[in-house]
Image: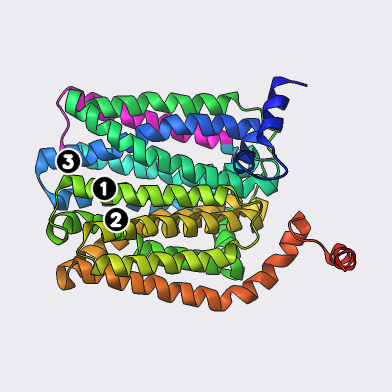
């Protein structure tokens, strides 16, 4: 037995338990990706914090902080649907190698301009927009590529949960490292470290051993394929309903984070450390959520989890808006992070499981639009509402919208299950009619 087989056997535990939570790492290609991304994402979160700090240091303007964030997100909203067509047409590994290489160059450009003290707010906005364009191709490409790294569809949900855990670990580690690096040598060093960290994921992509990809040569135009993808999403009720709720929560719920400085300073009478504790609590809750998904054995029950977690998120936002006590607020942020991550990962897992393979890239591009594309509009809406009625009422109204969305989804879950069941039977996740009869007779 090879060393790789030994490691696979060690990770696979048919009785569940700790090793069961890591079962997607049985797959060599996913292990490589997991290791490379774990390093690269720490650099990414370092750059996010360093960019915000650099913009505020150069300008002292909260408005320009919003402009930089908007410029980094709006290209994804505009380009992701077209990017999804290319993801379905091209070799997905090659797409990711190109996007990661371009992102590395973007970080090196930020590092060079900052370290040589030639950086200006205009260049930061331009480079942020460039990163947004790269993300428009990278995010649907990465989501669609998961199924190629994890050959057994039964392990796909676990791979998504582990990927979410990895993102949230980086979210906790990266900003802390960035704070220390900025204090010692400035923001430019964070950008340089981020650029170097991309080598880890690029190396992992080159090291993978994949089956030859059957790239479909198409004679139809990009617009025709884009329309085909839209018709599929709009016409297939399970995906349409999940993405509608996902977009609603992204628009109304998630932008609460931009109001956190107001809560930390004016509502809770704290400082920068209070803001750090609040955002840290969100990260811890999200990490706990991702790990709870990792120990699930299959996708069954995730539909119910979508509306429950959305409701938990909404209720937590309402109580957070009402709170004037730091400890209650921290607990509510913990639940917010849990509900937010649970809804996102559960939605992703179901969509990835049921989508037709030839439309995976396009569907995941619409997922990206719902995930990232709604954020700039949600941020603008949250800012306008906070200016009009105050931050606490804004967050409470956002929570109420999330609860309404959860109720709406729950009323449609029964009809969605009927449409998904044949797909689960075909994939072996649920027993077919004959097997069900046999199991029932044995059970008696």
Colour mode of the rendering = rainbow
Q: In this view, does 302 lie to the left or right of 381?
A: right
Q: Where is residue 405 in the image (x, y as percent from the top left)?
A: 44, 73
When the figure is inspected, residue 429 is found, relative to residue 392, above or below; the finding is above
Q: Compared with residue 363, is residue 140 higher up or lower down, i.e. above or below? A: above
Range of magenta residues: 93-121
Q: Where is residue 47 in the image (x, y as percent from the top left)?
A: 30, 35
Quarter where residue 216 is shown: top right
Residue where numbered disc 1 is placed? 277
Specify which label sits upstream in the sequence, 1 or 2: 1
**In the foreground, 325 or 45:** 325
Give me the disc on residue 55: 3
Camera-side residue of 413 and 144: 413
Q: State which tag comes first along the sequence, 3 or 1.
A: 3
Disc 2 to disc 3, C-alpha distance: 28 Å
| Quarter of the view holding residue 379 | bottom left
Q: Nearer the viewer, mark 2 or mark 3?
A: 2
Name the element at disc 2: helix
Few, some or many C-alpha atoms within 10 Å of disc 2 (few <14, some 14-19, many ≥20)? many
- How far across and how far down the image is residue 329, in percent? 27, 59
Residue at image coords 15%, 67%: 387
Other residues around mark 1 within 10 Å, as few (<14) / some (14–19) / many (≥20): some
**Does residue 383 show up?**
yes
Q: Is residue 222 at least partly visible in the picture?
A: no
Crowding at dot 3, Cα within 10 Å, few <14 / some 14-19 / many 20+, comes out as some
Residue name at image x 69 percent, y 72 percent: 418
Q: Residue at x 20, y 28 (%)?
A: 114
Mark 2 lies on residue: 330
- SS at badge 3: helix
């Amino acid at each position: 037995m090879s060393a790789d087989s030994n490691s696979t056997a060690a990770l696979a535990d048919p009785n569940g338990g700790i090793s069961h939570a890591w079962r997607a790492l049985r797959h060599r290609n996913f292990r490589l990706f997991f290791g490379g991304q774990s390093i690269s994402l720490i650099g990414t979160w370092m750059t996010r914090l360093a960019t915000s700090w650099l913009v505020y240091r150069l300008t002292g303007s909260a408005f320009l902080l919003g402009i930089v964030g908007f410029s980094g997100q709006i290209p994804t909203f505009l380009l992701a649907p077209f990017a999804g067509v290319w993801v379905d047409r091209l070799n997905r590994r090659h797409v990711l190698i190109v996007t990661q290489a371009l992102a590395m160059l973007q970080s090196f450009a930020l590092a060079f301009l900052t370290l040589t003290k030639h950086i200006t707010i205009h260049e930061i906005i331009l480079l942020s927009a460039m990163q947004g364009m790269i993300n428009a191709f990278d995010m649907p490409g990465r989501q669609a590529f998961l199924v190629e790294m994890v050959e057994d569809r039964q392990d796909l949900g676990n791979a998504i949960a582990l990927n979410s855990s990895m993102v949230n670990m980086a979210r906790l580690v990266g900003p802390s490292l960035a704070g220390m690096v900025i204090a010692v040598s400035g923001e430019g060093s964070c950008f340089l470290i981020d650029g170097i960290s991309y080598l880890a994921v690029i190396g992992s992509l080159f090291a993978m051993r994949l089956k030859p990809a059957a790239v479909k040569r198409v004679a139809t135009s990009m617009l025709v394929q884009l329309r085909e993808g839209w018709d599929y999403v709009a016409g297939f009720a399970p995906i349409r309903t999940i993405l509608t709720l996902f977009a609603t929560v992204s628009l109304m719920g998630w932008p609460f984070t931009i109001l956190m400085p107001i809560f930390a300073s004016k509502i809770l009478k704290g400082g920068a450390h209070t803001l750090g504790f609040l955002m840290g609590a969100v990260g811890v809750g999200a990490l706990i959520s991702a790990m709870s998904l990792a120990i699930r054995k299959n996708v069954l029950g995730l539909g119910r989890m979508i509306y429950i977690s959305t409701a938990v998120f909404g209720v937590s936002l309402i109580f957070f808006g009402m709170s004037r006590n730091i400890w209650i607020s921290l607990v509510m942020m913990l639940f917010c992070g849990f509900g937010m991550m649970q809804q996102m990962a559960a939605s992703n897992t179901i969509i990835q499981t049921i989508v037709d393979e030839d439309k995976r890239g396009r569907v995941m591009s619409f997922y990206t639009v719902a995930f990232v594309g709604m954020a700039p509009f949600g941020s603008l809406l949250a800012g306008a509402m906070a200016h009009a009625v105050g931050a606490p009422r804004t967050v409470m109204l956002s929570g109420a919208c999330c609860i309404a969305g959860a109720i709406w989804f729950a009323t449609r879950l029964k009809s969605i299950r009927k449409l998904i069941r044949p797909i689960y039977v075909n994939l072996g996740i649920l027993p077919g009619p004959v097997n069900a009869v046999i199991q029932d007779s044995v059970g008696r």
